[in-house]
Amino acid sequence: MVTSSEAASKRRQTRLRREYLYRKSLQGREKATYEQKRLVRAALAQGKKLPTELRASYDKLQSEIDQEDSKTEVQKTHVDDEYGDAGLEDPRVCVTTSRDPSSRLKQFAKEVKLLFPNSVRINRGNNRVTELIESCKESEFTDVVVVQETRGEPDGLVVCHLPLGPTAFFTLSGTVLRHDLEGGASPMSEAFPHVILNNFNSDLGKRIGNVLKCLFPVPRPDTRRLVTFSNDNDFISFRHHMYTKTGKDNVTLHEVGPRFELRLYQLRLGTLDQKDAENEYVLRPYQNTAKKRQLL
């Protein structure tokens, strides 16, 4: 039987989702208005005549410009709704697996849990996706990370941001666990790491870089733990290191592990349990042969 608090929580989530979709539907109109204001500001700053198409609406645009400050003059998007609290509070990540995981996937999930500060690993059991996401929302997790496998080999990673999304689906390849590293792995530090994002240049690349970096809290300047996501032809290489200073301008890297390669194949504007959510990006078969096309 559904309690009154659970019903109220579901109504609140539904309302937040409806408001988010409504604000997203207004983005096209707001973008056009923002561009008109930008042209007015540029014309006034340079002492030039206003474009002909803006003269009729100049008074209204000028009134809105006069009321803006440094925050409101910047265009807002749905990303600001999804990650509006990023950096204000430390993220809380829930790490889990697909159903009936193998021993290798369980070990990989343990190592993924150690990557993210303030994270918790839970056993999936027989919980459905809807039950998993609902319990994570009630526990105030900010993200859910699900690792998947095929015949005992990790081959999938899902990152779901709560409570509004987005959800990123990655294929996983070349996974090397900590105990499989050559020469052994360095001890795992619990310090908040510096996050290095390399070669995420396109709009989609910046979007994915934002999804990945928001899994980690803001580090201290003197931390010696490094987490690297490096994009090369839409394949993202993940590496985890500690470093020590060996001289005034010299440092030595020690790999901590694990290591793996990611490739984005879907980005959904919603949470993992929302099957009807809009797709922001989907990898198509013809894109596998487009060698010159780099989406990230």
Image (cartoon, helix red, strand yellow):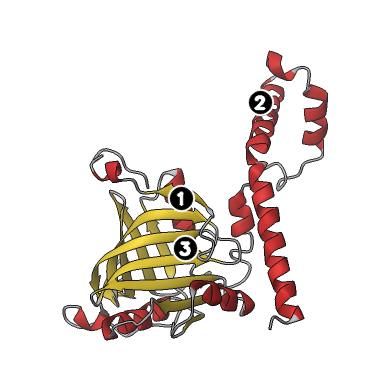
The answer to whether residue 39 is left or right of residue 56 is left
Dot 3 surroundings within 10 Å: few (below 14), some, or many (20 or more)? some
**Vertical comparison of 285 with 117: above or below:** above
Q: CA distance from mark 2 to mark 1?
A: 26 Å
| x, y percent for residue 94 | 49, 77
| Label whose residue precedes the other's in the sequence (3 or 1) | 1
One can see residue 221 in this view: no
Residue pictured at 35% horizontal, 81% vertical: 111
In the rendered view, would you say 106 is above or below 71?
Answer: below
Residue sitting farthest toward the left: 182
Q: Position of residue 5 (x, y in %)?
A: 74, 79
Please name the residue shown 83% across and 24% down the image.
Answer: 59
Q: Give the percent coordinates (x, y) of residue 243.
A: 32, 74
Asked whether the residues under the numbered discs 2 and 3 touch, taking CB atoms below 8 Å apart as contact, a structural biologist would say no
**Looking at the image, is mark 2 or mark 3 earlier in the sequence?**
2
Q: Give the SS element for disc 2.
A: helix
3D distance between C-alphas at marks 3 and 1: 10 Å
- Are the residues at dot 3 and dot 1 in contact (C-beta closer than 8 Å)? no
Find residue 265 and report its image quarter: bottom left
Q: Is residue 257 above or below residue 274?
A: below
Name which residue type carries label 3.
Answer: Lys
In the image, residue 95 above or below residue 33? below
Q: Secondary structure at mark 3?
A: helix
Q: Which residue is mark 2?
A: 39
User: Would residue 16 appear left or right of 127 to someone viewing this image?
Assistant: right
Disc sitting over residue 206 in the figure: 1
Q: Nearer the viewer, residue 134 or 176?
A: 134
Residue 78 is labelled as none
Residue type (three-letter) at the residue carrying disc 2: Leu
Per the image, the residue denoted by label 3 is 213
Of badges 2 and 1, the one in the foreground is 1
Tag 1: residue type?
Lys
